[in-house]
Amino acid sequence: MNPKEWRKEQKKLFTEHVGIPTCSKCKYTSDTLTHFDFHHVFPESKSFNISRMLGRYKFDTWKAELNKCILVCKHCHASIHDSV
């Protein structure tokens, strides 16, 4: 499996952990996982960046980090960070 396919599989696992691929803010739904990001609700509790954890941490570690996040579409994620 090439790195791009592997990352896609990892994101699929992460998304399944968080729930149905639906934006927590605007309720947008899509089967295309690249339309979504994981957003840390409380940035001060962030141990590491989700995109950097692919393949570097054990299941329990990334599961604990994902529990600090909500799934949002890219538009809402940009809006959240723009308003901070």
Image (tube, rainbow, N blue to C red):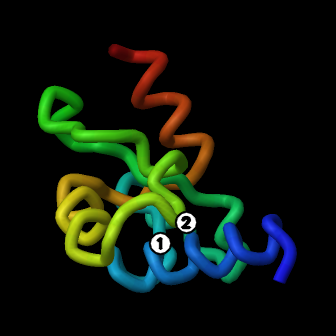
Residue 54 in the image: x percent, y percent? 52, 61
Find out whether the residues at labels 1 and 2 contact each other: C-beta distance under 8 Å.
yes
23 relative to 47, above or below = below
Depth check: give the residue in front, 33 or 22. Answer: 33
Task: Compare residues 38 and 80 and report the one nearer the observer.
Answer: 38
Tell me residue 64's x, y (percent): 18, 64
Q: Which mark is residue 28?
A: 2
Q: Nearer the viewer, residue 66 or 26?
A: 66
Left or right: where 47 falls relative to 7: left
Q: Residues within 10 Å of mark 1 (few under 14, many from 20)?
A: many
Check residue 64 in the rendering and tell me which mark sits there, or answer none: none
Q: Position of residue 63 (x, y in %)?
A: 25, 71
Q: Residues within 10 Å of mark 2 (few under 14, many from 20)?
A: some
Secondary-structure class at tag 1 = loop
Which residue: 43% across, 50% down?
50
Quick check: 44 above or below 74?
A: above
The residue positioned 80% from the left and 76% from the top of the image is 5
Mark 1 sits on what residue?
22
When the figure is inspected, residue 53 is found, relative to residue 15, above or below; the finding is above
- Lower sequence index among marks 1 and 2: 1
- Residue type beneath disc 2: Tyr
Please state if 5 lies on the left or on the right of 47 as rendered: right
Residue 11 at x, y = what percent? 57, 71
